[in-house]
């Protein structure tokens, strides 16, 4: 409220409050509220963090590109072409030691075999992400590390941007 006023008025208000001994009690009352607002804003910014990237796959089955944009995903590989479509984030842990994101495609084209695309970063290979594609949301949610039948495609992809 005071920030929008002229600096001279801010100084005037500060001087009145400080000379009458009101500045310190007011700052004690307002500081917790200001800190709470800062925490709420920081959490809102963190919740809005969107992971995007362009990934290049190599090899017979994985040759092509995956585009994860702010609101759409697209994956064109040798055996499956998933046109640009909206997605819902199923799981996202981008701050851990091995960041991971899984997205559920809202609309599949006829040529798209995947319903869920999951990307996992391996710190041992800093330029590559492991992309896994699942036929259905249920296959993704009920997967195990040994269960490769549920996955339709598993590719090591280089992050280009």
Image: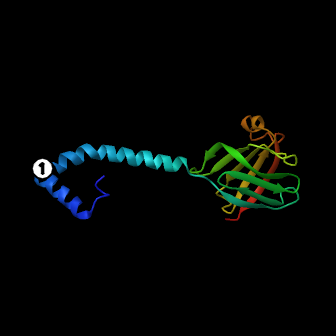
Instruction: Identify which residue is drawn at 15% across, 58% down.
Output: 15
Q: Name the residue under label 1.
A: 21
Q: Is residue 125 above or below residue 106?
A: below
Q: Where is residue 10 in the image (x, y as percent from the top left)?
A: 23, 59
| Circle 1: element type | loop
- In this view of the protein, which residue sits in the foreground, 151 or 72? 72
The picture quadrant where one finds residue 92 is top right
Disc 1 crowd, CA 10 A, few/some/many (<14, 14-19, 20+)? few
Q: In this view, does 136 lie above or below 18?
A: above
Q: Where is residue 103 in the image (x, y as percent from the top left)?
A: 70, 45
Instruction: Identify which residue is drawn at 64% across, 42% down.
Output: 91
Q: Position of residue 123 (x, y in %)?
A: 64, 57
The picture quadrant where one finds residue 147 is top right
Question: In what quadrant of the picture does the C terminus appear?
Answer: bottom right
- In this view of the protein, which residue sits in the foreground, 119 or 67? 67
Q: In this view, does 55 lie above or below 111?
A: below
Q: Position of residue 146 (x, y in %)?
A: 78, 40
Instruction: Identify which residue is drawn at 39% across, 49% down.
Output: 38
Q: How many marks?
A: 1
160 to the left or right of 10: right
């Amino acid at each position: 409220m005071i920030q929008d006023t002229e600096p001279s008025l801010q100084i005037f208000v500060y001087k009145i409050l400080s000379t009458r001994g009101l500045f310190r009690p007011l700052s004690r009352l307002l500081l917790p509220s200001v800190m709470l607002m800062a925490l709420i804003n920081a959490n809102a910014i963190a919740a809005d963090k969107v992971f995007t990237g362009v990934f290049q796959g190599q090899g017979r089955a994985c040759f092509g590109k995956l585009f994860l944009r702010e609101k759409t995903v697209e994956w064109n590989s040798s055996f499956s072409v998933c046109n640009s479509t909206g997605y819902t984030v199923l799981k996202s842990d981008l701050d851990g030691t091995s960041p991971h994101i899984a997205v559920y495609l809202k609309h599949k084209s006829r040529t798209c075999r995947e319903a869920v695309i999951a990307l996992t970063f391996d710190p041992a290979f800093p330029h590559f992400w492991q992309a896994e594609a699942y036929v259905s949301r249920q296959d993704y949610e009920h997967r195990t590390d040994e269960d490769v039948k549920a996955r339709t495609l598993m590719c090591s992809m280089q992050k280009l941007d």
